Amino acid sequence: MYAVIATGGKQYRVSEGDVIRVEKLGAEVGEKVTFDQVLAVKDDVMKVGSDVAAATVEADVISNGRAKKVIVYKYKPKTGYHKKNGHRQSFTAVRITKING
């Protein structure tokens, strides 16, 4: 059984027991979170649309952190313009515990 959920502008295919990194949720470690934006659920039959309107996915927050640094370098030739920036994206790691659907 798996579900497709949407959070943080992205879609994830999850099963029970999976650990995924999503955009930062603002939840503390050990808290339970519920994803109610479920797009599809597959058990024996694929259910989408109004069939999964009441479906939810429950998860436990494992950790909060920041990803590896990404270097952003802007450069325009012949003008002497260059700019170097770094960015570290915040994330929340969650373990999927239950798919209700």
Image (cartoon, rainbow, N blue to C red):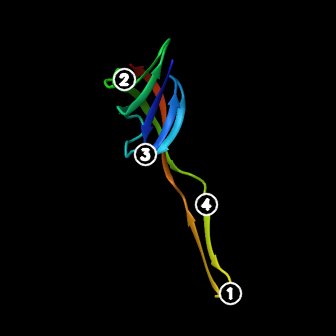
Q: How crowded is the residue under tag 1: few (<14 C-alpha within 10 Å), some, or many (20+)?
A: few
Amino acid residing under circle 4: Val
Write the residue at 51% across / 55% down: 89
Residue at which label 4 appears: 70
Residue at which label 2 appears: 52
**Element under label 4?**
strand
Q: Which of the two discs, 4 and 1, labels the residue nearer the N terminus?
A: 4
- The x and y percentages for residue 67 are 56, 52
Q: Cβ–Cβ below 8 Å for labels 3 and 1?
A: no
Amino acid residing under circle 1: Lys
- Work out how far the residue at label 2 is from the one at label 4, CA to CA, in angstroms: 37 Å
- Work out how far the residue at label 4 is from the one at label 1, CA to CA, in angstroms: 26 Å
Q: Which of the two discs, 2 and 1, labels the residue nearer the N terminus?
A: 2
Q: Cβ–Cβ below 8 Å for labels 2 and 4?
A: no
**Element under label 2?**
helix
Q: Residue furthest front?
A: 49
| In the foreground, 61 or 71 | 71
- The x and y percentages for residue 95 are 49, 30
Q: Which of label 4 and label 1 is nearer to you?
A: 1
Residue at which label 3 appears: 8
Write the residue at 43% across / 45% down: 8
